[in-house]
Image: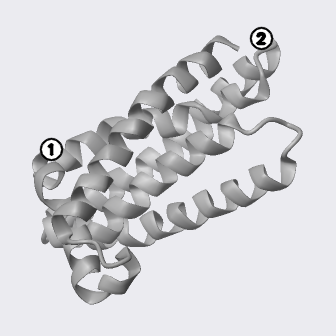
Amino acid sequence: RTLYLTSFTLWIVISLLAITIGSQSFLVFVVLRSLAAVSSAVLGVLSPVILADLFHGNALGVALVGMHASEVVSSATIAPIYSSLVVSSGLPWQAGLLPGPILALVPLGGMLWTMKAMQFWIPSMILSAWTYAPEAFLGLSYPSVTTLNSLLVLSGTVSGMPLLLWFAQV
């Protein structure tokens, strides 16, 4: 589940980051979209596994059919309709890439809420990394590492929100 949440979060972050790249940086855009595709592929592989862990018998069959039906509905109906609206409205090309990662924030929030991962996942991941490779953290203590992580997350939020709001206005 940790790999699933990590891949899901990376897909959202990298997809949104790729949108902010201007058309002058096409190579960077392609690299970011490729990394997002890798994260998406991990989700595609792990989703049925997680469903198999959560459901059994007929309920598993219904869950798998529901998952595949939602993929068909979104790729065959919603995506073409939205794409045609973007193309015909004169919006910038980045607008076509926005709905996926933005809508994915809802299920990610739900998963984090139900798994209580907001309180457990990140600190335990940092503790595991610090335990197995303390030299990677330049000899800092675990409280120092978590403090730095919290400060980086806070600074990213404080600087990232105005950047995203500015991008939305452009």
| Quarter the N terminus occupies | bottom left
| Quarter the C terminus occupies | top right
Dot 1 lies on which element? helix
Q: Nearer the viewer, residue 70 or 139?
A: 139
Q: Which mark is residue 89?
A: 2
Q: Nearer the viewer, residue 131 or 161?
A: 131
* Residue at the spot 58% in from the left edge and 67% down from the top edge: 38
Q: Is 24 on the left or on the right of 7, as rendered?
A: right
Q: Quadrant of residue 95?
A: top right
Dot 2 lies on which element? helix
Above or below — where is 114 with respect to 83? Answer: below
Disc number lying in front (2 or 1): 1
Above or below — where is 159 with respect to 138? Answer: above
* Residue at the spot 26% in from the left edge and 78% down from the top edge: 130
Q: Which residue is mark 1?
A: 113
Looking at the rendered structure, the kind of residue marked 1 is Trp
